[in-house]
Image (cartoon, helix red, strand yellow):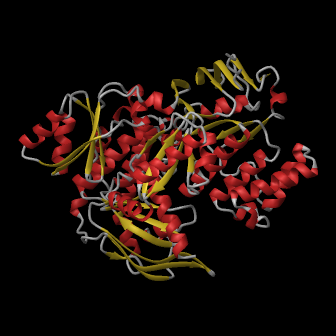
Amino acid sequence: MNPPAQPVISVSGLWRFYGRSKKVEAVRDVSFDVRRGEIFGLIGPDGAGKTSIIQILAGVLNAHRGSATVGGINVLANPEAVKERIGYMPQGLGVNLYESLTVAENIDFFRELRKLPENIYRENRANFLKMTRLDRFVDRRAANLSGGMRQKLALICTLIHLPDVILLDEPTTGVDPISRQEFWQIIHRLVEQRHVTVLLSTSYMDEAERCHRVALVHSGVVIDQGTPDSIRRKATGHYARIVAEPQTTALRILQQRDDVSATEVFGREIRVRSTAPLGGIESDLRAEGLDVQSLTVEEPKLEDVFLQLLAPSKQRTPTLRVAAARHIVAESPIECHGVTRRFGEFVAVDQVHLHVERGEIFGLLGPNGAGKTTLIKMLCGLLEPSAGSIRVAGFDIAKEKRRVWTQIGYMSQQFSLYRDLTVQQNLRLYADLYGVQNAASTDMTASLGLEPFQSRLAGDLPTGLRQRLSLLCAVLHGPPVLFLDEPTSGVDPPARRVFWDLIYSLSRESGVTVLVSTHYMDEADHCDRLGLMNQGLLIAADSPGTLKQISENRSGKLLSVRTHDFSAAFDVITTRFADAVLYGDSIRLRSFDPATDEQKLLSLLSNAGIAGTQISSPPLSMDETFLDFIRYSERVHA
């Protein structure tokens, strides 16, 4: 028996401090190994310490304790030596690119840095341009590329010298789902074909499923590590989705139960985690006079384990109620009729017809450049439509813009706070702007758990509390309509759960109409309805469940294939199933006849000498549904 291969990346007892007194522990006693041909993910929110770890391994940041080796090189003792052996892509949309240079010129610049021979460079350049589908844009300046295209160009520049070790820091943050999917396919293809070693960081919990192994990182500490499956199996309790009416009453009853440790609302469904068998919950809800329409048992998610590790006991659910009922609002507080916006000859939003009902949570999804931000700006009265009409909170945006501004709340991705003001000063500023009495803000501050932090600067608050403060500032004046632009970007899972609980209470208990944009596909399931945009068009608008069903009817059910040798299996499967994609250590494809295709797959792999195959049919995710709608739209409008 051969001894196990030495890890390509080895980290042991790593520490990194910040500040003059070194009191801020960004990395605390971190240890992990990464093997050749493996994708290892550092999974956690902003500020978890992921970037510091990657920068130490890339030789651009010093560590204060511990050891770290990359490809046999002691990074702490000889940081310059490791830079020739790796490809390092820092955080940010193409931050290593030169804006004024074209795609071709950026790639050529990195070729010069790496001193690549002409023949190797030409071959690598051609392969990567084809793989990333940037071969049609070689003469376009980097400044004019979309976010996804910038990231793919940055990846080419990182990989042009074909390194054996790739370090990627938040490579898909701010990138639309289609570009994320393409980005991951490129990474998987490199690992499958060249057995490169990949260490990447991400705040998207769903991306952990695409890694072979992961480390869950929080506040500088690795709280668990292993394969996604092995970590998921550590979840305790029973999980189910319940549809019961009236929903607000069902939620209140569930939250008051001692055996229910967590609740989460997804449209009409309430997802619960219970320490006791679920049968008693259903019968007790019926005994309370509720109409229990369904109770579906489901498996825990990786995020559930993360939450249990961070908060093992039941957490208090904050509430947020506003006096939106004092406003007289139409049944459809947001209405668009044939709305179009042109910038010169470019059509950013094209003939959008949309209505959002009172108290509804409506999610707006689409790739970068789809027109979401332009549409939201028109709804807020910040941009004039080129054609069409918009009514918000019952007012015509073209004729009564100033009245609309008093009726809406807006929360940007940057939280819209003055960081050098205290919590109390931020609230007083917004209260004065909107003419709100201090008593109202005081009551809401207490309900959000912000009272103990009144004198703390907003910039010094933990991200989750800063997010709550920003939301409070946006709804302080009781607007009947609320716009949220990427509100949970980079926020840790517990804070995201709390945020969506607050959105639910605003919607259901105060009747606030919420329009939210997000790049987290799992968050889309929280919405009552979703609007999918692509190339300026609104291509679909319906409930998440209905959209999934439409996608399944159109493109088939999902099949997931796992084998001991998934790389070889992928080569075999794609000879018969061209649309199959790599997904972590599994292969996924769509099928109209799952039973027949499962037998075909088993036979195909068995004939190729690949044993130990397991095939399952997981439910279709919102991510896969969204991608299917976008691709269908592009085929129809080609």
In the image, residue 409 sits, relative to residue 317, either above or below, namely below
- Decide if residue 497 is in sight here: yes
Farthest residue, direction bottom = 387
Q: Residue at x 93, y 52 (%)?
A: 118
In the image, residue 176 sits, relative to residue 341, either above or below, namely above
In the image, residue 73 sits, relative to residue 139, either above or below, namely above
Q: Is residue 288 left or right of residue 439?
A: left
Q: Residue at x 12, y 41 (%)?
A: 285
Q: Residue at x 57, y 52 (%)?
A: 181
In x, y percent, where is residue 23?
59, 21
Quadrant of the snapshot with the N terminus? top right
Quadrant of the snapshot with the C terminus? bottom right
Q: Quadrant of residue 479?
A: bottom left
In x, y percent, where is residue 555?
45, 62
- Decide if residue 418 is in sight here: no
In x, y percent, where is residue 493?
43, 38
In x, y percent, where is residue 419?
52, 43
